[in-house]
Amino acid sequence: MIQKILHTPEGVRDIYSEECEKKLILESHLRQVLNSYGYRDIETPTFEFFDVFSREVGTIPSRELYKFFDREGNTLVLRPDFTPSIARAASKYFMNEEKPIRLSYLGNNFINNSSYQGRLKESTELGAELIGDSTAEADAEVIAMVIDTLLKAGLRDFQISIGQVQFFEGLAAEAGLNGQKEEELRQLIINKNSFGVEKLLSEETIDEELKKVFAALPSLFGGEEILERALSMDAFKNGGSSRMTSASQAITRLQEVLDILKIYELDRYVSFDLGMLSSYMYYTGIIFRGYTYGSGDALIKGGRYDQLLGHFGKEAPAIGFVVVINQLMNALSRQKIDILSEHSRYLILYHKRNRTAAIQKAMDYRRQGKYVELMQMEDGKGKKDYQTYADAEKFAGVIEMEDI
């Protein structure tokens, strides 16, 4: 029984010692970036009513939620996704606010995913939401903040891949596909399966030029030229219906966002993927993910969700993102990028007869902003006997009081 309770449940883990210290340092550095853009901290509960994350909201599937009941019989869930929680809180506390609201947060999410995926079921996320601003400037600000966040973490080789939900939705509406066919098409495009897209649409009576656009979606990724290539396709040349106009406007919006990122001088970090789609159905416009080598999954996830706050009674556009701290830590480790403490750590060794002097020196160091660990030595042992421990803990210095 004792051995069993020493272990954590599947999908969660302990974080301690040097790894925990580095995680806290990283989180502190990243929060500084968000605060520097004018974002103010907010904390929402670890668990909420089920309806905050219901199917109508378009977030995590119900089967992947950790559900339980309160004393009144209400269904509660551990928070699986920050965005609906922030949308609920913003709708409650800023219902009549007309100016943009900038909120940032840090906390843990819980998703009861399948164990074979090898993913943690509890993960730490840091993020920000810009509420009440529908402009391309807001899109660019959030993406610029994402890039600055990764640069602050120490990464240099990464890419923010940008897509546009309205582009696919405009095309799908023009094609007139039913719900099931549209979902099948969505999954094929997500999986970059051009052959599957062509086969699925071969049985549909839709315009041939439109079929070519769908078939090209899995390969429409790259630099600025991808946007120009999309608009040059024959399906867009003759104007077309309002739905096709919506799709072309989505591309124009991406071009405007890119122009603003050039002003930030951060455009070299972005690319475009017009076949990018998300399982989160609340996204309504630009979506993006951040990738680097050393991590199989995205470090960054985000996008625009202009209708989500309406579910909670506040009609307001919004855009946001999260940094998946666990993924970022893994990437930094594999790229051998160290997370350095802003404080030096010292070990002061003393015998009982030197206790007063040792404590006084430790307090003097701490007033200088240094971190100090006091350790009373066993009789007959000296500094060399503690060097292995000191090396393992990476102290900046080891001081034996008898040497003073």
Image (cartoon, rainbow, N blue to C red):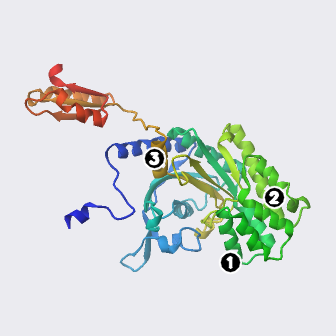
Tell me the quarter of the picture where residue 149 sits: top right
Q: Position of residue 154 (x, y in %)?
A: 51, 38
Q: Residues within 10 Å of mark 2 (few under 14, many from 20)?
A: many
Left or right placement of residue 233 versus residue 22 in this view? right
In the displayed structure image, the side of residue 192 where residue 360 appears, left or right? left
Report x, y in % for residue 195.
Answer: 72, 66
Residue situated furthest bottom in the rendering: 73
Q: Compute the Cα span from label 1 to label 3.
A: 39 Å
From this viewpoint, which residue is outermost toward the top? 404
- Which circle marks residue 66 in the picture? none
Considering depth in this image, is 127 or 346 the residue closer to the camera? 346
Q: Which of disc 3 and disc 1 is earlier in sequence?
A: 1
Say which quarter of the image contains residue 366.
Answer: top left
Residue at 83% x, 66% y is 210
Image-based side of 204 in relation to 109, left or right: right
Residue at image mark 1:
180
Disc number for residue 248:
2
Compared with 137, 151 (above or below) is above
Q: Earlier in the sequence, mark 2 or mark 3?
A: 2
Q: Relative to 229, does residue 12 appear above or below in the rendering?
A: below
Between circles 2 and 3, the one closer to the viewer is: 3
Which residue is label 3 attached to?
329
- The residue positioned 83% from the left and 55% from the top of the image is 231
Residues marked 1 and 3 touching at CB (< 8 Å):
no
> In x, y percent, where is residue 252?
79, 53
Marks 1,2: beta carbons within 8 A: no
Examine the rendered structure and indicate whether residue 308 appears above or below residue 97: below
User: In this view of the protein, can residue 337 be seen by the observer?
Assistant: yes
Q: Residue at x 57, y 44 (%)?
A: 38
| Residue type marked 2 | Ser
The amino acid type, in three-letter code, at marker 3 is Met
